Image: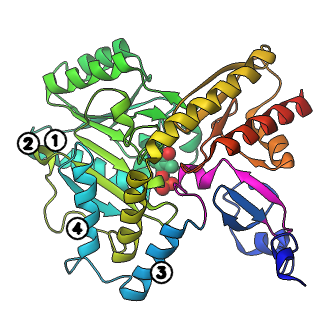
Amino acid sequence: MSPETTLDKPTTPLFDPETFDRYVMKTYGRFPIALTKGKGCRVWDDRGREYLDFVAGIATCTLGHAHPTLVSAVTQQIQTLHHVSNLYYIPPQGDLAQWLVEHSCADRAFFCNSGAEANEGAIKLVRKYAHTVRNLENPVILTAKASFHGRTMATITATGQPKYQKNFSPLVPGFVYVPYNDIEALEATIAELDAEKPQVAAILLEALQGEGGVRPGDLDYFQRVRQLCDEKGILLVLDEVQVGVGRTGKLWGYENLGIEPDVFTCAKGLGGGIPIGALLCKSACDVLSPGEHASTFGGNPFACAVALAVCQTVERENLAENARDRGEQLRTGLQAIAADYPDLIAEVRGWGLINGLVLKEESSLSSIDIVKAAMELGLLLVPAGPKVVRFVPPLIVSESEIDRAIEMVREAIASVV
Ligand SMILES: *Cc1c(COP(=O)(O)O)cnc(C)c1O
């Protein structure tokens, strides 16, 4: 076999899904392909078939696959020191915290390993603040309907979607749901909950709802939420797990809304695919003391050094600007397709490189039909609910890759209508 053919021809025995399913719990509905290699915005399956990756591990592979900076940060740190413990000072953890603080509205950071874990930390911080600073007896956290905050018990409870909670009762007490982007409903809920004595400790929201259907936050709504929080001493917590680190065309999702949260979380894009999560807060609510919150793996030298390299690359290579420009190009292309299918497509919405092609409720097609058709043609996409097709490519995506993706979406839609 000549070396040029190694990308096209399988070099190892073909992957066997039956063996996989014999040993792995069936907690995921998986597409029937096995990805085994990636470079930039392209990935290959075990048969050597190439795909353009507009999923990026669900908004996670910020720098795409096998980016030289990522590879060198991983290699360098694993050869030096990969894990110790928070029993000791960890210099790369301090460096990453400093970068995040200097590039956001936050004053301090805590590191963990995932988005759900970061949100768990935020919930604990909010409750401690409510008890110790505001003397609330039974603190309540308001979250939005159609939100997504993770899969742990507290975060499925925070998630305002019954489908993630079904069969897992009893849920965690202390959460109340409000419709997203609806200021009157929020004011009414707070008035009701705080009628006898104050209970509302925090409002936890996504700047843009990702899993819930790529629904951007409304500027007026968030400004009003910020005002309400200031008036009442309520903490505003933003879940930036899916939108943080440049994806929206700004470094942080909240920058699109002209407000600053008291607390925010990030994870997905932060490590470029290496597991890491972060909880960030302003000094006024930095209330967790030694022994109250911890994580064995959280903030280890490996994850922090890699995340710092990802963040510095986003800054150095102007990837937030690229997200803004390529996102505009993508939405323009998708809008042209939408104009040709007025009975199928309701709208195209999003910020930067998190976008949704929204199908009409009454259409017989669902997002998964389009995702499957696109996959057949060599484009990876991911649904965000039954009627929204989500586009979250790596932030390094090029103009020609966006053009190719738009063409494949057009072909995919033509093949299913
Ligand atoms: C993915 C996601 C989470 C959960 O993150 P995990 O790393 O899977 O725990 C939480 N919030 C939002 C907004 C997300 O998109």
Please name which of the two marks, 4 or 3, marks the residue nearer to the observer.
3
Q: Amino acid at mark 4?
A: Gly
Q: How far apart are the two marked residues, 4 and 3, measured between alpha carbons?
A: 20 Å
Mark 4 element type: helix
Residue 334 visible in rendering: yes
Q: Could you say which is closer to the camera, residue 154 or residue 352?
A: 352
- The answer to whether marks 2 and 1 mark residues whose Cβ atoms lie closer than 8 Å is yes
Q: CA distance from mark 2 to mark 1?
A: 6 Å
Q: Do labels 3 and 1 touch, CB within 8 Å?
A: no
State whether residue 21 is above or below residue 348.
below
Q: Which residue is mark 1?
A: 130
Q: Which residue is mark 4?
A: 94
**Relative horizontal placement of residue 102, taking residue 256 as reference (left or right):** left
Disc 2 crowd, CA 10 A, few/some/many (<14, 14-19, 20+): few
Q: Residue at x 37, y 41 (%)?
A: 252
Residue at mark 3: 75
- Residue under label 2: 133
Question: What amino acid is at disc 1?
Answer: Ala
Instruction: State which region is magenta.
Output: 45-65
Residue 53: in magenta span = yes
Queried whether the magenta region covers residue 329, the answer comes back as: no
